[in-house]
């Protein structure tokens, strides 16, 4: 608990250096909420740190931000932001793989991303994924396209992938059809900075190069 508080205190102090009074207060509020959730064993340090950096970035762009906001009885999103009539959800991904998935990390993380996009993007006007620079997210190509451009085979492929890991409840085909991905947030904790990219640029820059290396090896 002491180390968790010290880490959040250190990060909050760094984020406050260029913040106005309103933002400083909001950062303190978010930090206190994360401490409360940590005491209840509901959050982890690496994930919480990334949420706080992302929240600071969004607040500096005019958003009001909450962390660990409950959407339904079973869904809680990482970052929920509003600006005027706009609402935005950002799910933060660290690339963690549980021990029971050690032999299938790529498929597991790809399914995790697909399920997050399919389930969470319906609860806000916009949806984004946040990740550190050292983790390259394997985003299913279907979600880079608009919903009316997704082929049946692509949708069924995502559905099959999600069904491998999510059965209670399963991710529905309707959720996959209507899901939207608007933005990628690259969260650099070391520098306490966030860089934004479109899903198209992110996938084209990283996924295509990885697939090329794999197929040519």
Image: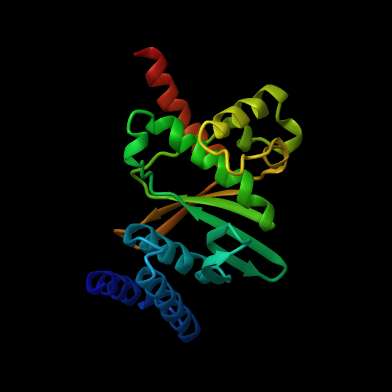
The quarter of the picture where the C terminus appears is: top left
The picture places residue 85, in percent across and down from the top left corner, at: 72, 68
Q: Nearer the viewer, residue 24 or 5?
A: 5
The picture places residue 30, in percent across and down from the top left corner, at: 45, 75
- Side of 175 relative to 51 (left or right): right
The picture places residue 3, in percent across and down from the top left corner, at: 23, 70
Single out the residue that lies furthest toward the top.
216
Single out the residue that lies furthest toward the right.
148
The image quarter containing residue 12 is: bottom left
The image quarter containing residue 97 is: top left
Q: Nearer the viewer, residue 205 or 127?
A: 127
Single out the residue that lies furthest toward the left.
3
Question: On screen, 58 above or below 152?
Answer: below
Residue shown at 68% from the left, 52% from the top: 122
- Side of 15 relative to 205 (left or right): left
Residue shown at 50% from the left, 84% from the top: 22
The quarter of the picture where the N terminus appears is: bottom left
Q: Nearer the viewer, residue 112 or 198?
A: 112
């Amino acid at each position: 608990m002491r180390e968790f508080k010290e880490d959040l205190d250190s990060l909050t102090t760094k984020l406050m250096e260029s913040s106005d009074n309103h933002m400083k207060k909001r950062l303190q509020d978010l930090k206190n909420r994360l401490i409360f959730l940590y005491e209840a064993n509901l959050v982890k340090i690496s994930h919480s740190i990334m949420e706080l950096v992302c929240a600071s970035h969004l607040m500096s762009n005019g958003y009001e931000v909450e962390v660990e906001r409950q959407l339904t009885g079973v869904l809680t999103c990482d970052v929920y932001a509003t600006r005027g009539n706009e609402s935005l959800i950002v799910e933060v991904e660290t690339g963690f793989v549980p021990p029971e998935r050690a032999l299938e990390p790529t498929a597991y993380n790809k399914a995790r991303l697909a399920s997050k996009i399919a389930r969470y993007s319906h609860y806000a006007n916009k949806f984004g994924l946040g990740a550190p620079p050292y983790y390259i997210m394997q985003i299913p190509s279907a979600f880079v396209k608009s919903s009316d451009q997704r082929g049946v085979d692509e949708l069924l492929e995502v559905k099959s992938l999600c069904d491998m890991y999510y059965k209670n409840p399963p991710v529905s085909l309707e959720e996959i059809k209507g899901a939207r991905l608007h933005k990628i947030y690259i969260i650099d904790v070391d520098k306490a900075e966030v860089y934004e990219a479109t899903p198209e640029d992110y996938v084209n820059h990283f996924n295509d190069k990885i697939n090329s290396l794999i197929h040519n090896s």
